[in-house]
Amino acid sequence: MAKSKTPSYVLTLRIKTEIHQEHKLSKRFELCRGMYNACLRELLKRYTALKQSKKYKVVCKMEKGKKRNKLFLELNKEFGLAEYSLHEFVKPMQHKFKKNKDSFTSQKIATRAFKAFEKLMYKQGKKVHFKKYGEMYSVEGKSNSTGIRYKDGNIFWNGLVLRTIVKRKTTMPTLR
């Protein structure tokens, strides 16, 4: 996958939550974990079907080159082993839980699962790791204008407003 051309950053902030907000966050993280694992299962199922196909076996025996690579890409598309086909896979799940997850966060979860699977597919890893209960610690959105947003010291996510804790320093550091 190509490197992003837009400026990106990671901002880690502590949040001040009430007990009902913690319950909602816990529920949302578990839903995201379930979606991530479902994406990995679906990708593994599609990959197994691909590897068992006659076309794949024929292409594997071909001499390495551009023609072979092109055929592999076509096979990947045919068997749904593309990032955007996975976005279509998560769409019905996202609609079912739309009160808790927005579509852009769901798509980023699918992208995250696809990147993990890609390492297996391109022989950069031996297996994919499913998330266990309570192991999903972070989720992301596509931009700050939709989905999970940070504005005026608060995090907004589908009706949930979380106050952040920002320690203010009395003196600002200067660049020299």
Image (tube, rainbow, N blue to C red):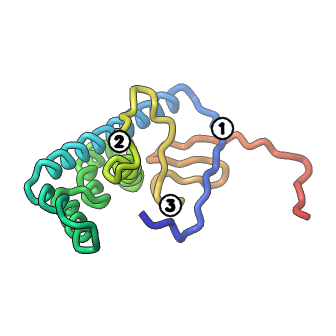
Query: What type is the residue that disc 3 sits on?
Result: Ser
Q: Position of residue 6 (x, y in %)?
A: 55, 69
Q: Position of residue 23 (x, y in %)?
A: 47, 28
Q: Image point 62% across, 47% down: which residue? A: 154
Q: Image point 26% across, 52% down: which residue? A: 91
Of callouts 1 and 3, the N-terminal one: 1
Question: Looking at the rendering, which quadrant does residue 38 occupy?
Answer: top left
Of callouts 2 and 3, the N-terminal one: 2
**Number of marks in the rendered image:** 3
**What whole-number distance in Å separates the C-alpha atoms at marks 1 and 2?**
25 Å
Mark 2 element type: helix
**What whole-number distance in Å separates the C-alpha atoms at marks 2 and 3?**
20 Å
Quickly name the residue at label 3: 143
Q: Position of residue 63 (x, y in %)?
A: 22, 67
Crowd class of label 1 (few under 14; some 14 to 19; many from 20; radius 10 Å): few
Quickly name the residue at label 1: 14
Residue 102 shows in the view: no
Quickly name the residue at label 2: 36
